[in-house]
Image: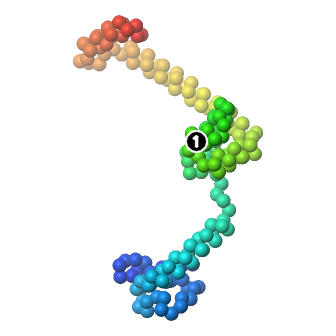
Amino acid sequence: MYQHVGWGEERIPTWHAPSLRWPLGFTTAQPNSQPCGIALNLRARLLQQQVRHMASTTSPAPTVVRTSRGLSIVGTRITLYSIMDYLKAGWPAELIRDRLNLSDEQIADVLDYIEDHREEMEAEYARVLRQAEENRHYWQERNQQRFAQILTKGPPPGKEAIWTRLQAKKKQLSIP
């Protein structure tokens, strides 16, 4: 609607609205100069009205979207699987909202989404839990192997004395 037509003396852009006719005296007569304050106020009010009109005609943005992490709440890194964890643990919606710093609208939309897509959500949640268990098992096994390897290594070169003192302290405290 508004078109940038040039820069004023103070490097502030001047704007021209071709479809609007301004009464005489509301702008300066020189090209590329700043309009007077009244014109700026009128233009700002018209622009605010247009923005309000555009905002009222657009449909609301969805609260739940699918990302690379799975179903998530827009504008956050919170997945619906986290919400499902809290719901399965018996948390009320108000506590979940407060814990995750969500708005009333966000938590209501998420709970509606979960209820509307109950079967799909349950299946996907079960798949996520199974994958998390596999990951936990993998890392636990890998870490156990690594810890066993570290224990068999012995002290680093030049640190034998402190290693001996550490082993004696562990034995005194009954630490394996």
The N terminus - image quarter: bottom right
Residue underneath mark 1: 98
Which of the two residues, 63 or 101, is positioned nearer the viewer here?
A: 101
**Can residue 3 be seen by looking at this rendering?**
no
Looking at the picture, how far across and down is residue 38, in whole percent?
A: 48, 83
The C terminus - image quarter: top left
Dot 1 alpha-carbon crowd within 10 angstroms: few under 14, some 14 to 19, many 20 or more: few
- The vertical placement of 101 against 10, above or below, is above
To which quarter of the image does residue 83 belong? top right
Residue shown at 71%/40% (left/top)?
Answer: 121
- The vertical placement of 85 against 161, above or below, is below
Which of the two residues, 35 or 68, is positioned nearer the viewer here?
A: 35
- The vertical placement of 16 against 83, above or below, is below
Looking at the picture, how far across and down is residue 74, in whole percent?
A: 59, 51
**Can residue 41 be seen by looking at this rendering?**
yes
Element type where label 1 sits in the image: helix
Looking at the picture, how far across and down is residue 26, in whole percent?
A: 48, 88
User: Could you tell whether 165 is left or right of 146 in the image?
Assistant: left
Looking at the picture, how far across and down is residue 163, in whole percent?
A: 29, 14
